[in-house]
Amino acid sequence: MSEATVDASVDSSRRTWLITSCAMGGVGAAAVAVPFVSSFQPSERAKAAGAAVEVDVSTLAPGEKRVVEWRGKPVWIMRRTPEQLAGLEKQEDQLADPNSERKAFPTPEYAQNRHRSIKPEVFVAVGICTHLGCSPSDKLSPGPQPSLPDDWQGGFLCACHGSTFDVAGRVFKNKPAPDNLEVPPHHYLSDTTLLVGEEKKA
């Protein structure tokens, strides 16, 4: 066997060894990286204990509602249309607590306004009826509908016992639900990122 053939055989063996070593190293690095990266996400236990939830609201279209889970509860995040915001004052004389003054579910100071939110268009509320814990359904189209008044401006209906709420989660008078929908602690990390579950630090 010539010297050139021996050198070529040695180079081929080294190349194979290097490729195999690099491949195995890459697999090992990935195996270590996956649990490391996933450690940045809240665990299921942390979520259940009330870990805050980040939500990107930039993709939320007008009239669209998204649901996230916080402390085992469904939290609604809805971008209201200008028409829905304009309708908030039209039925205030029919609401049980239009100014959110009742204290069973205290409304955060930053949501003690007609639209019950930090930004008028973005509504954040726990989607659980304050009567017996059912989840109200969307009845966002205005106008007469079954189980709703003829001058309905849009909102939510708890079909279990007939409680109705406007698009700010305010309950109507003479309904089983004793209070408005709960507004959870929340604040904006940026113009497009909402953090549900924590008040803004001073």
Image (tube, helix red, strand yellow):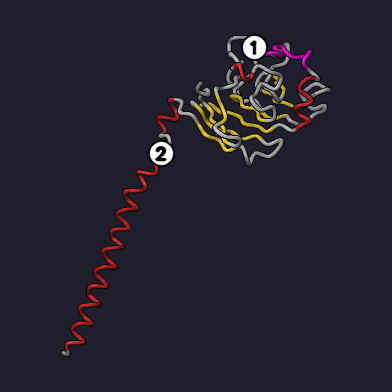
User: Helix, strand or loop at disc 2?
Assistant: loop
Amino acid type, mark 2: Phe
Q: Which residue is drawn at 22% across and 75% down?
A: 13
Q: Distance between the residues labelled 1 and 2?
A: 40 Å
Q: Does the magenta stretch include residue 122?
A: no
Residue named by callout 2: 40
- Image quarter of the N terminus: bottom left
Question: Which residue position is annotated with label 1?
Answer: 178
Quarter of the image where one finds residue 173: top right
Residue appearing at x 42%, y 33% in the figure: 44
Q: Position of residue 51 (x, y in %)?
A: 45, 28
In this view, the residue farthest toward the front is 202
Q: Is residue 72 left or right of residue 97?
A: left
Quadrant location of residue 136? Answer: top right
x and y, in percent, of residue 164 in the image: 71, 20
User: What percent of the width, then of the height, locates residue 77?
Assistant: 62, 31
Q: Tell me the kind of residue under disc 1.
A: Pro
Labels 1 and 2: the sequence-earlier one? 2
In terms of secondary structure, where does tag 1 sit? loop
* Dominant SS in magenta: loop
Q: What stretch is highlighted in magenta?
A: 92-100
Going by the picture, which residue comes out furthest to the bottom?
2
- Nearest the viewer among 14 and 137 is 14
120 with respect to 125 (left or right)? right
98 is higher (above) or lower (below) than 167: above
Is 80 positioned to the left or the right of 33 in the image? Answer: right
In this rendering, the answer to whether 57 lies above or below 185 is below
Q: 109 above or below 40?
A: above
Residue at image coords 63%, 9%: 102
